Amino acid sequence: MAAPTEKKEIDISLQAYDPEYCPVATGLRNIGNTCFMNAIVQAMLGITSIFKTAYLQRESDSVANNPILQLFVKMFTDKSRINEYTQTLYREMIGKSLKRIDLTRMDIWSQEDSYEMFVFILEELCKCPDIEILFNHRTTTTRKCLKKGCGHTSTTRDTNQMFIVQPDIKVDQLPETKSDETSQDLNDFLKKYVSCVPDFTCKVCKDKGTKLTFTKVTMIPEVICVVFRKYFQKRATPFPMKLKFADVKEKKNYIYDLIAQVEHSGSQGGGHYYAICRRKDGWKRLDDESVSDGIPGPTENTYLVFYHYVGDEYV
């Protein structure tokens, strides 16, 4: 359950990473250009709160009537058939994508995008409210008009399930908002950042142009997913092994550990996906059926990273 990062209005606790629900490393069979799905499934298998929540509530309607969530429960309870369940998941998700009314669809046997597969799977899992709150974070965004003599500000509050950032963690900032030319620390960026919105019309002066935005995270969940936009620029974006978010009133930090990263080698036109994940038997590189020791950390191929809440640090 998500927790506020500054003002604690109600008694809310986060579900900590539980090693008991972390699997032993197992390879997944590639049944034809399915590395994109294998990599994201491997990353999600390390999110212990998904399995703990679904397993402990497996008799509830929200879990029992969710076929995709049921597959994840089976992956946890019957690891000997994990390839069978993964292949079923692939067919189910491709079938669901083909029925979508938008243009975001996937074709069978073709190379697709791990991030898009993650979004599709998460949409299905989040039909269970207790799974949805594991990913939801809230932000407050203030927009400021830059027209001389106006300076009007407006504030919106949003709920999202992942952070999407540029590889250099600068988010298209205007020259006057940059403190220097170095990239912002990822942990600091996730807490708050300044960016700009082009072609935004001010409600007061009606001026249409670039407006400053100040975004601040106000509530954090158990699971933090960060997606690096690397379509046009591949570089090693620094990210830490741990994240900290302060609760000033309670005088403590919420601590998050890196648990998985999805890698994509190649280019926008093609390539190969694999994952580096935390498992019961240590960090592993999970490359389809191949399982070997892995070393977590930034590379130019890192596409998504996942952090899980592990506990509190009192200050």
Image (tube, rainbow, N blue to C red):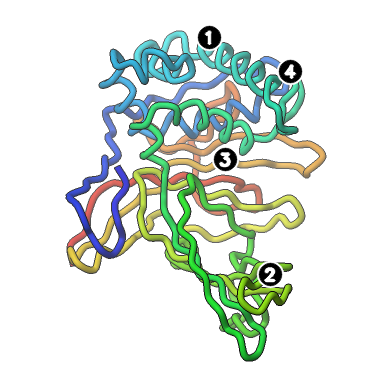
User: Distance between the Cα atoms at labels 1 and 3?
Assistant: 22 Å
Residue tagged 2: 201
Q: Which mark is residue 108?
A: 4
Residue tagged 3: 262
Q: Quadrant of residue 180?
A: bottom right
**Does residue 289 appear anywhere in the picture?**
yes
Q: In the image, what residue type sits under mark 2?
A: Thr
Please indicate whether residue 130 sits to the left or right of residue 122 in the image: left
| Label 2 SS | strand
Q: Closest to the observer: 47 or 218?
A: 218
Q: Quadrant of residue 270?
A: top right
Q: Closest to the observer: 250 or 160?
A: 160
| Label 3 SS | strand
Residue tagged 1: 84
Q: Position of residue 262 (x, y in %)?
A: 57, 40
Q: Position of residue 283 (x, y in %)?
A: 43, 38
